[in-house]
Amino acid sequence: MQFSQITGHQETKKLLVSSVQQNHVAHAQLFLGQEGSANLALALAYATYINCENKLPDDSCGTCGSCTKMNKLVHPDFNFVMPVTSTKNVTGKDVLSQKFLAEWREFVLASPYQGLNEWMQFIGAENKQGNISREESRQLVRLVSLKAFEGDYKIVLIWLPELMHTTAANALLKLLEEPPAKTLFLLVSQSAEKLLATITSRTQIVQVRNFTDDEVKAWLQENYQTNEQAAYQVAQLAEGSLNAATKLVTEVSSDYFVFFQDWMRHCYSYKFAEVVDMSEEFQKLGRENQKNFLLYALNLFRKVTLYGVDASLVPFMPPAEQNFIQNFSKVITQQNAGQLAEELNEAHYHIERNANPKMVFVDSSISIAGYLRHNR
Ligand SMILES: [Zn+2]
C-alpha cells in the first residue's frame, strides 16, 4: 500500500513521512481510528515507506524489490498478528495468526477498510468471536528474537490489539518495555481504552480521524464509478467509514432524494392515491434499502430543520437538494419537526422488526401529512 492510494489524510501522511526522513521512528506506534477509517491503510503505507529502497519525498517508490513484496504483503520482515479463532480447517493449537496468513493477505488486499466482522466471516468463523490468544504471545516472542532478513527493520503489525488475551497483552508489554533492536511495533486499534494503559503509554499515538463526507464521496467515485448524487447520498450515511460506504454503495440502487421529495410533496398535498403507488415502489426496495432510505430521510430532514434555524448551519448541498430544503423548511415548525423525526424513526424501527413495508409506508404518510397540514 502506498500513501497515494489513501484518500485524504495529507497531514498524517506528512507527519509519518517526516518521522522516517528525520530518523525519528518510534519503536512502537498506535494507529488509532474507528472501523472503516484509514488506520490500517496508513500503517501499511508507513511500513512500506520505511522499507522502501528508493524513497520519494512523500511516498514509497512502489516498484523496488521491497515495495513489490510489501504491496503483496509477503515481505519476510513484515509480520502480522490479528484476532483469529478455530474454523473448519484450523483448530486447537494451530489457531494462530500465522496459520491464517494467506487469508489475511487476500482480505487486506481486497480492502484495508474492512472490520472484524468481515474478517471473521472471511475465515469462516461463523458466530465465534476472534481474539489474540495466549499461545500467540509465544509466537510473538519467538518472532522478535529473529533478525531482520532483508530490511533494516523487522516490523510487527498487530491488528486490533484490544482483542489480546491478558497473557498476550502482558507479553507485548514486556517487549515494549525492553524493545528488541531494530524492531517496530505498529498497533492498529479501534479503541485505546480497551488496551492496557501501560501499553498505550509506551506507544506513540497516531490519531486517524474518520474520512470526511467529501473524501468518502471522492473515494466512491474513483473506486466504484458511483455517480455524483449516489456518492453524495452514501457519504451522508457512511459516517466516515469506507467499510460502511462499500456496503451502502451496492444497496443504494435508487435515487433516495427524488423519492423523498416526491413523498413529502404527496403528503403535503394529501394525495393519498399517489402515496399508495409510492408504497409499492417502497416495497420493492427490499428491507436493507428501505432502512437506508429512512435513515437518509432522517438525515435530510435534520438538515431541513437546521436550515430553518440558521441556513449557514447547513454546508454545501447539491443544487436540487438545496432548493428542496429551502422550500420545505418553510412548512417545518419547532413542533412538527420533532413529530416528523419521530415518525421516521418509528418507521425505521418497524421495518427493522419485519413489519409489512407497504403498511408502514402508508401509515407514516398519513401521520406525516397530518403534521405538515397542521402548519398550513
Ligand atoms: Zn520502494
Image (spheres, rainbow, N blue to C red):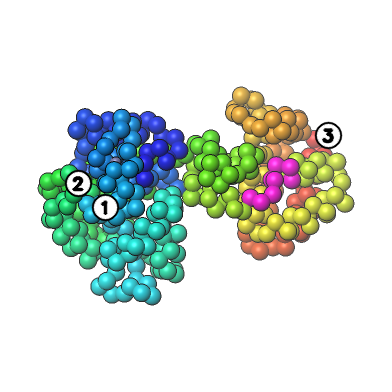
Mark yes or no: residue 104 visible.
yes
* Sequence-first tag of 1 and 2: 1
286 displayed left or right of 36: right
User: Mark 3 Cα within 10 Å, few/some/many (few <14, many 20+)?
Assistant: few
Along the line of sight, which residue is nearer the eye, 42 or 158? 42
Q: Quadrant of residue 18?
A: top left
Along the line of sight, which residue is nearer the eye, 39 or 103? 103
Of badges 3 and 1, the one in the foreground is 1
The residue depicted at 64 percent of the width and 35 percent of the height is 303
Q: Position of residue 110 (x, y in %)?
A: 44, 54
Mark yes or no: residue 235 visible.
no
Residue 258 within the segment the image draws in magenta: yes
Q: Position of residue 313 (x, y in %)?
A: 59, 27
Q: Position of residue 179 (x, y in %)?
A: 14, 47
Residue beneath label 1, please? 75
Residue 355 in the image: above or below residue 335: below
Amino acid type at mark 1: His
The residue depicted at 55 percent of the width and 53 percent of the height is 247
Residue 1 in the image: above or below residue 133: above
Q: Between marks 2 and 3, how big is the CA–CA gap?
A: 73 Å
Along the line of sight, which residue is nearer the eye, 83 or 7? 7
Q: Between marks 3 and 1, how big is the CA–CA gap?
A: 68 Å
Residue beneath label 3, please? 376
Q: Are marks 1 and 2 in contact (CB under 8 Å)?
A: yes
Helix, strand or loop for disc 1: loop
Residue 151: mark: 2
Magenta range is 252-259
Mark 3 lies within 8 Å of ligand 1 (Cβ measured) = no
Helix, strand or loop for disc 3: loop
